[in-house]
């Protein structure tokens, strides 16, 4: 049977947007997802993680609906989700080295040199992320504050402006996917040890919760709702991470000190 084509692909504007998003996704996937067979991709664990994510999203929306203030609550929930996606890789860069150091020190002495030798891929992933964010932020700040374009001929200023716009249009979805994959893979720390992503996830979710509490304070609603909103996510993520670690040990023979 001939394959049916999506009629939206005939719309030029939609086709261009789809191509930009696909290109950004492909570049982010190539740079920030370095599996190489080192990560244990357990379908059961992946389904449980997806179920927990969907349940957490529904719980967040329910709390925003019952105890929020109209559309501001929905906007706040969406903004918090996007903000956490952006801030998670940054907090991971800050806290990740401490967790990795503790993980390496906890390992038996004869395994530590081998674990340290595997840091190349995570460090390279972090370097790519920092470079991408720095270039994107630098171009935006420079384009918004500099009078350099006014000193150029009109044709040159037009070319530079087009380059800046193209970088922004392509760079925004690229940074979104880069942040998503960096947080999802914990900067490919599975190359150091298969258990490290789960450990980092459990630690990072509490760091993000404390960070949000310091910046935004307690959530709205009665005390029970506040505690559920504040602790529900970290506790459920930690429970799934601990279960994932146990499953690695019992089903795949992977241990923290092995």
Image: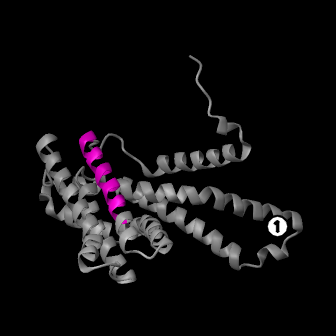
Up/down of 213 relative to 99, above or below: below
Q: Residue at x 83, y 76 (%)?
A: 150
Q: Nearer the viewer, residue 117 or 106?
A: 106
Q: Main secondary structure of the magenta part?
A: helix
Between 25 and 53, the residue placed more toward the observer is 53
Q: What percent of the width, then of the height, locates residue 153? A: 88, 69
Q: Is residue 111 left or right of residue 26?
A: left
**Structural crowding at the residue carrying mark 1, measured as other residues with C-alpha within 10 Å and reported as few (<14), some (14–19) or many (≥20):** some
Percent x, y of residue 250: 11, 44
| 49 is within the stretch colored magenta | yes
Q: Is residue 207 depicted above or below 128 in this figure?
A: below
Q: Tell me the quarter of the picture where residue 173 sits.
A: bottom right
Q: Is residue 53 magenta?
A: yes
From the top left corner, tell me how far across and down residue 64 is, in percent: 39, 70
- Would residue 191 be seen by someone viewing this image from the given angle? no
User: Is residue 68 left or right of 137 when viewed as pictured?
Assistant: left
At x 80% / y 73%, what residue is drawn?
149
Residue 213 in the figure: left or right of residue 250 = right
Q: Is residue 5 above or below residue 214?
A: above
Which quarter of the picture shows residue 91? Answer: bottom left
The residue at which mark 1 appears reads as: 157
Location of residue 234 (image quadrant): bottom left
Q: Which residues are magenta?
A: 42-60
């Amino acid at each position: 049977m001939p394959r049916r084509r999506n009629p939206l692909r005939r719309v030029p504007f939609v086709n261009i947007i789809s191509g930009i998003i696909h290109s950004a996704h492909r570049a982010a996937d190539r740079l920030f997802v370095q599996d190489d067979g080192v990560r244990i991709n357990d379908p059961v664990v992946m389904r449980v993680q997806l179920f927990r994510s969907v349940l957490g999203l529904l719980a967040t929306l329910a709390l925003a609906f019952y105890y929020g203030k109209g559309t501001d609550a929905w906007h706040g929930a969406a903004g918090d989700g996007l903000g956490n996606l952006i801030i998670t890789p940054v907090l991971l860069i800050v806290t990740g080295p401490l967790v990795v150091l503790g993980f390496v020190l906890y390992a038996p002495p004869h395994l530590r040199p081998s674990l340290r030798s595997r840091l190349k891929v995570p460090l390279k992933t972090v370097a790519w992320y920092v470079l991408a964010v720095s270039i994107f932020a630098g171009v935006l700040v420079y384009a918004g504050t500099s009078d350099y374009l006014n000193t150029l001929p009109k044709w040159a200023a037009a070319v530079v402006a087009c380059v800046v716009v193209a970088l922004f249009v392509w760079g925004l979805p690229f940074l979104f996917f880069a942040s998503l994959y960096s947080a999802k893979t914990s900067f490919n720390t599975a190359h150091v040890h298969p258990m490290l992503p789960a450990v980092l996830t459990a630690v990072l979710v509490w760091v993000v919760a404390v960070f949000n509490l310091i910046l935004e304070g307690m959530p709205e609603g009665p005390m029970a709702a506040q505690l559920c909103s504040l602790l529900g996510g970290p506790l459920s993520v930690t429970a799934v991470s601990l279960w994932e670690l146990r499953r690695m040990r019992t089903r795949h023979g992977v241990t923290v000190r092995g």
